[in-house]
Amino acid sequence: MSTSMRFVSEQQPEKAALHNYALLAGGYFSLAFALLQVSGIWWSPSAIKYLGGPADLSVQKPVVYAALCLVVAAGVAVFGLYALSGAGKIRRLPLLRTGLIIITVIYLLRGLLAIPQLPIVLRHPNLMRFLVFSLISLGVGAAYLAGVMYLYRYGRPGEGRSSEA
């Protein structure tokens, strides 16, 4: 075997890892949240109000409230599908990396609401749930961020590393 043939065979592209656990976790959380959002259609107005939702809308215009729940659930489900696509569990979705970056920013910005909420919660401990929601979003955003970084480094599982953004 010639030296040039051996050199070419040694320069094989870096193989992608088997699993992107961070995107899997973020994706499954997003899909679970989408199901929870759909279930909100049947919640009582007091439960909706407690969780910060539009309780009056659920009573006065239940069809509009149901449509709102479904639209939010669909959006969050798309977030989950993009994460699962990045993790290689479903087919590659269009603008995968760009979409994942946008989704990551949305979760992180929602999570960063914890900063202005903290002094309010310290004065009104009964509002702790809103701080918890923000911290959950921050955690999911961190999972997406770790998953996106992993995706850029290793590519999608089962594919070689790609330069496509």
Image (cartoon, rainbow, N blue to C red):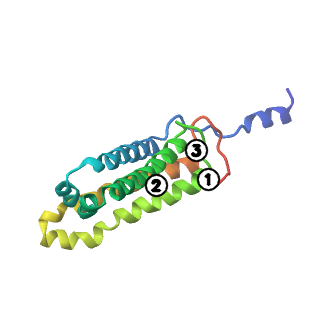
Q: Position of residue 63 (x, y in %)?
A: 35, 55
Compute the Cα span from label 1 to label 2: 16 Å
Amino acid beneath label 1 = Leu
- The residue indicated by pointer 2 is 145
Whole-number angstrom distance, CA of label 2 to CA of label 3: 14 Å
Rendered position, 159 above or below 65: above
Element at label 1: loop
Q: Position of residue 92 (x, y in %)?
A: 60, 42
- Residue at horizontal 62%, vertical 49%? 94
Residue drawn at (37%, 63%) of the image: 110
Q: Position of residue 7 (x, y in %)?
A: 79, 37
- The crowd level at tag 1 (other Cα within 10 Å; few <14, some 14-19, many 20+) is few
> Where the C terminus falls, by quadrant?
bottom right
Q: Mark 3 belongs to which amino acid?
A: Tyr
Report the disc number at residue 95: 1
Q: Which residue is mark 3?
A: 154
Task: Say if mark 2 contacts mark 3, CB within 8 Å.
Answer: no
Residue 61 marker = none
As drawn, 27 above or below 95: above
| Picture residue at 24% right of the left edge, 61% below the top | 55
